[in-house]
Amino acid sequence: MPKLLRVGPPFVVAAVLLAGCSAAPPGVATPTATTESAQPQSQTEACFALLTALGPSALGDLTSVLGDLSSDPAKALKPLKSFAENLKSAAATVTNAKVKSQANKLSASLKDLIAQVQKAIKNPKKATRLGDDVQSVRAALTTLGTLCTGL
């Protein structure tokens, strides 16, 4: 029997965030040294910079890893760490306070989740907050998606 793909709200957020990421939205300047230093980064520019730095499949990959986490925490650890590192680097390119703050919240949620996954690998009984941390990451991802798609 074929497996059914479960598509939840984070996947939808990721898809919306990534829609049209191949170029800057119409009317939005692609960040350059001159535009970054001359004027504050708009929310749209910040979202675009963040998503461009993460790459087109990063959020979809994260959503997939979150979905597979309960069945194979060890397999999920490496992609979670990779996404967390990429997010930290991508957030460093953002100067808009709202977007940077939300990217940092997602980063902190991922850090907590990674700690719980590591506990689950060593001793599943000690990973008591795993479900809560997954929900925290999903909530932070959804908030970032709302911030970046309502423009």
Image (cartoon, grey):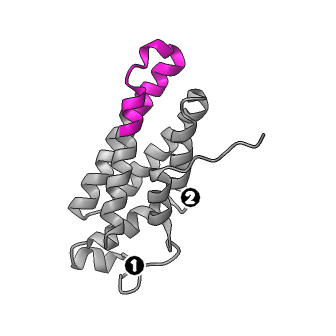
Q: Which quarter shows the N terminus?
A: top right
Instruction: Please state which of residues 19 and 36 is positioned toward the viewer in this rendering.
Output: 19
Find residue 52 and report its horizontal and vertical position in percent: 46, 66
Q: Disc 2 marks which amino acid?
A: Ser
Q: Does dot 2 land on a helix, a strand or a loop?
A: loop
- Whether 102 is drawn above or below 72: the answer is below
Would you say 121 lies left or right of 24 here? right
Instruction: Please state which of residues 95 and 34 is positioned toward the viewer in this rendering.
Output: 95
The residue that appears at 58% across and 46% down in the rendered structure is 6
Find residue 145 and report its horizontal and vertical position in percent: 37, 59
Instruction: Please state which of residues 84 and 117 is positioned toward the viewer in this rendering.
Output: 117
Q: Residue furthest bottom?
A: 27
The residue that appears at 28% across and 53% down in the rendered structure is 102
Find residue 125 and report its horizontal and vertical position in percent: 46, 13
Circle 2 packing at 10 Å, graded few (<14), some (14-19), many (20+), is few
The part of the chain drawn in magenta is 113-135
Q: Earlier in the sequence, mark 1 or mark 2?
A: 1
Q: Is there a contact, CB below 8 Å, between mark 1 and mark 2? A: no
Would you say 23 lies left or right of 146 here? right
Would you say 93 lies left or right of 124 here? left
Q: Which mark is residue 30?
A: 1
Instruction: Please state which of residues 149 and 56 is positioned toward the viewer in this rendering.
Output: 149
Q: Disc 1 marks which amino acid?
A: Thr
What is the quadrant of residue 34 in the picture?
A: bottom left
* Residue 151 magenta: no
Q: Which mark is residue 57?
A: 2
Visible in this render: residue 93? no
The residue that appears at 21% across and 78% down in the rendered structure is 39
What is the quadrant of residue 113 in the picture?
A: top left
